């Protein structure tokens, strides 16, 4: 019998950091392993096919190091990491299906209004397309004040 899997996508944000303890608790309760995933987005092409890089992104090696730093606090919770490239929502849904994940646990920034309209909502796209239940955790602004992101200094 295959081990149960809880997929935990991270974008290294405070919202992701806040959701990790919930993913860890669910993994412990269900004797599941955590599959901690980061989806690196490819550079955007525009105009005549030129690449737009905008602000410099961390190197793939730096991103892999950041991903390896995301782990459960309890050393008894089994986990693995996966770094992939593509559309975040699409890749998360694809990996959840391939791995037969019992659940996806993710943090959300909770953007609303014009910001959500312009940026879209990865969490919403995952909820709509996921092959399994999705727990979306939104940390309140009061709890986020004073916290530092896991990827500080990037």
Image (spheres, grey):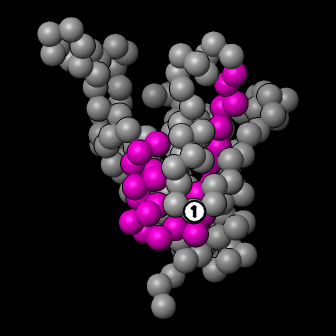
In x, y percent, where is residue 44?
Answer: 28, 22
Could you tell whether 61 is left or right of 20 in the image? left
Depth check: give the residue in front, 77 or 22: 22
Estimate how packed mark 1 is, as few (under 14), some (14 to 19) or many (20 or more) residues with alpha carbons within 10 Å.
Answer: some
State the residue lying farthest toward the right.
142
- Is 80 situated above or below 134? below
Q: Quadrant of residue 6?
A: bottom right
Residue on which the image places disc 1: 132
Viewer-closest of 109 and 76? 109
Q: Residue 110 in the image: state x and y as whole percent.
A: 70, 30
Q: Residue at x 54, y 40 (%)?
A: 125
Q: Is residue 109 magenta?
A: yes
Residue span colored magenta: 89-112
Q: What SS does tag 1 mark?
A: loop
Quadrant of the frame with the C terminus: top left
Give the x, y percent position of residue 151: 52, 35
């Amino acid at each position: 019998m295959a081990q149960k899997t809880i997929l935990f996508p991270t974008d290294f944000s405070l919202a992701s950091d806040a959701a990790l303890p919930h993913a860890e608790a669910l993994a412990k309760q269900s004797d599941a392993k955590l599959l901690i995933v980061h989806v690196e987005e490819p550079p955007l092409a525009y105009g005549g096919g030129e690449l737009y890089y905008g602000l410099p992104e961390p190197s793939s090696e730096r991103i892999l190091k950041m991903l390896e730093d995301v782990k459960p606090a309890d050393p008894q919770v089994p986990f693995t990491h996966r770094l992939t490239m593509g559309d975040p929502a699409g890749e998360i849904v694809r990996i959840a299906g391939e791995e037969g994940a019992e659940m996806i646990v993710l943090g959300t920034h909770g953007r609303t209004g014009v910001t959500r309209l312009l940026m879209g909502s990865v969490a919403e796209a995952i909820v709509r397309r996921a092959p399994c239940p999705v727990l979306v955790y939104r940390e309140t602004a009061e709890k986020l004040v004073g916290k530092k992101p896991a990827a500080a200094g990037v």
